[in-house]
Image (tube, rainbow, N blue to C red):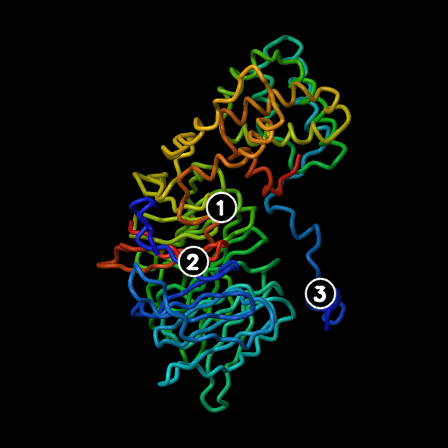
């Protein structure tokens, strides 16, 4: 029998059950609504416009809305992307120095997300600069963790 | 096989097969070595560190890839495979093995197998989200399998029995490390669990404790005397959990995940994985930290022979510039640079570590198998 890999064995066993997307959601995830997140987004924008970029990036990468729905995540991501792209190339390394390991992990997620959407691709150069400085500082560790992390942004 | 060009921690390196070795195991006296190779399990007799082990038996009853092998204290070999079966191989006096099929009653591949310390039962992990605990029933002359199902959500990657033979730690692709009870009535005694910090009652299949790591758990191992369990996960972390539910985590210094871990003593753990060489972690005051790498290739310092032979043909006219000959010569050199560097004993990921020698609770030699078809023995 050559095509044994194609047999839908679950169809014969009601108890077997497929792994649903629900099964992979990390436990203890708190649901965040757009309303709850709005103050943080405003704060992020005001920090970025007042030029205190290090505080803006630190805020953006602390406690990201893992438990939010997709549109809320997208709104938050917009604010983060704006902040990241406003930073001058020469300041990037300095800001990354100030981030904790957890914040670096979150930053990698936003960089990859940025590179995957058209808005971010327009700013590809600056995102790559962030990425370069981050890997210089932290090695491949944040990337390995990003690949296996089920908490998405 | 000469190993002189390797790091001094490498005691022996054997290239055994031209296929990945997913799992290997030694007999109690370390005279026999069993490895997985495609759909077979190969048994070798060791002949010292300097001569190639001798193939003495090929266990060939599986018809899909063999995923794991383990040898009990009595010398029985158990293998499990993607063909959804396990076999117990009883050694006979003439050096051959008698196979007994164990019906696991699972509908997907078996992925991991582990004998209980007593040697009277074993556990098999599978992609069917089931752990099958199997034991021999005298009256039926049959290996019976009992299932642990809940709350496993995905493939079980790894299993480890506590020394008491009741607690069974498992890890899988659902990102959980769980401790179950594998208590079998009539086989295990309840007395052995009195005073255990893990609880009071251990009915078969009950979940004793679980930890959420989030990424694939690749390997898990008990340190029974201090009631701790270590595990490695695909996010490049080594974690050590205890009966209070506390967990301490340390990152891989090179970032690449580990596939296997081995307790060296109560305060040291050796890990091996995608960086192709073992890495030692030590428990300091209240935290685990990286202590040293074994057999690490120094990428910055290629062997001295590099470029040594490059001068002999460079007496052509330099004004000739980028001649076709020169261009092709340079192309030819591309990708060759690594060939000049010292290589680690393993050329591909290490997938399993086993104890090779120990004294007074301290492991002194460790054996590893890798995707490169090699078995390497390190002294630690």
Q: Do discs 3 and 2 share a chain?
A: no
Q: Do discs 3 and 1 share a chain?
A: no
Return the residue at label 2.
B15
In three-dimensional space, the C-alpha distance between marks 3 and 2, rounded to whole angstroms, equals: 32 Å
Q: Quadrant of the N terminus of chain B?
A: bottom left
Q: Is residue A101 left or right of residue B196?
A: right
Q: Which mark is residue B274?
A: 1
Q: Chain of mark 1?
A: B
Instruction: Please tell me which residue is depicted at 73% across the width and 73% down the height of the picture.
Output: A1
Instruction: Please tell me which residue is depicted at 57% across the width and 26% down the height of the picture.
Output: B326
> For the residue labelled by badge 1, is the local secondary structure a helix, a strand or a loop?
loop
Up/down of B189 relative to B324, above or below: below
Seen from the viewer's position, the closer of residues A3 and B146 is: A3
Q: Chain of mark 3?
A: A
> For the residue labelled by badge 2, is the local secondary structure a helix, a strand or a loop?
strand
Q: Which mark is residue A5?
A: 3
Estimate the x, y position of residue B322 in percent, counting from the top left: 60, 21
Estimate the x, y position of residue B58 in percent, counting from the top left: 47, 74
Up/down of B203 relative to B279, above or below: below
In the rendered image, the residue lying farthest to the bottom is B139
């Amino acid at each position: 029998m050559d095509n044994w890999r194609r047999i839908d064995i679950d169809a014969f066993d009601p108890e077997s059950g497929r792994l649903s997307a629900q099964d992979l959601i990390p436990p203890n995830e708190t649901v965040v609504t757009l309303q709850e997140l709005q103050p943080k987004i405003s704060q992020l924008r005001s920090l970025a416009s007042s030029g205190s970029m290090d505080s803006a990036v630190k805020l953006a990468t602390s406690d990201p809305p893992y438990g939010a729905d997709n549109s809320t995540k997208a709104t938050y991501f917009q604010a983060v992307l704006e902040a990241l792209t406003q930073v001058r190339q020469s300041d990037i390394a300095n800001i990354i120095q100030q981030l904790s390991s957890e914040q670096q992990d979150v930053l990698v997620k936003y960089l990859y997300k940025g590179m995957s959407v058209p808005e971010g691709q327009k700013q590809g150069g600056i995102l790559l600069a962030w990425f370069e400085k981050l890997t210089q500082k932290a090695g491949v560790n944040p990337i390995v963790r990003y690949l296996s992390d089920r908490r998405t942004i | 096989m000469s190993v002189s060009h390797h790091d001094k921690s490498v005691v022996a390196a054997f290239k055994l097969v031209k296929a990945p070795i997913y799992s290997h195991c030694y007999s109690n006296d370390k005279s026999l070595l069993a490895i997985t190779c495609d759909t077979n399990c190969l048994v070798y007799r060791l002949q010292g560190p300097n001569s190639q082990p001798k193939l003495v038996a090929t266990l060939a009853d599986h018809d899909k890839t063999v995923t794991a092998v383990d040898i009990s204290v009595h010398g029985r070999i158990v293998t499990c495979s993607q063909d959804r079966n396990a076999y117990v191989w009883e050694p006979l006096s003439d050096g051959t093995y008698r196979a007994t099929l164990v019906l696991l009653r699972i509908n997907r591949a078996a992925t991991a197998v582990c004998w209980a310390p007593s040697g009277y039962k074993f556990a098999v992990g599978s992609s069917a989200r089931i752990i099958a605990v199997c034991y021999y029933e005298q009256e039926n002359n049959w290996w019976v399998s009992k299932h642990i199902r809940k709350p496993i959500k995905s493939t079980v990657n790894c299993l480890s029995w506590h020394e008491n033979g009741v607690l069974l730690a498992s890890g899988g692709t659902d990102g959980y490390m769980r401790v179950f009870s594998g208590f079998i009535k009539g086989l295990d005694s309840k007395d052995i669990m009195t005073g255990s910090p893990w609880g009071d009652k251990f009915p078969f299949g009950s979940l004793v404790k679980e930890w959420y790591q989030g990424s694939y758990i690749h390997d898990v191992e008990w340190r029974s005397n201090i009631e701790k369990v270590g595990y490695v996960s695909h996010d490049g972390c080594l974690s050590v959990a205890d009966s209070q539910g506390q967990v301490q985590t340390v990152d891989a210094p090179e970032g690449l995940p580990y596939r296997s871990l081995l307790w060296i003593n109560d305060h040291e753990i050796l890990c091996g994985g995608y960086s192709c060489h073992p890495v030692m972690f030590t428990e300091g005051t209240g935290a685990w930290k990286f202590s040293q790498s074994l057999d690490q290739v120094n990428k910055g310092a290629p062997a001295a022979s590099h470029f040594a032979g490059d001068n002999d043909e460079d007496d052509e006219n330099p004004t000739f510039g980028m001649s076709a000959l020169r261009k092709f010569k340079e192309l030819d050199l591309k990708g060759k640079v690594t060939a000049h560097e010292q290589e680690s004993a393993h050329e591909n990921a290490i997938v399993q570590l086993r104890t090779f020698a120990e004294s007074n609770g301290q492991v002194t030699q460790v054996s590893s198998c890798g995707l490169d078809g090699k078995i390497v023995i390190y002294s630690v």
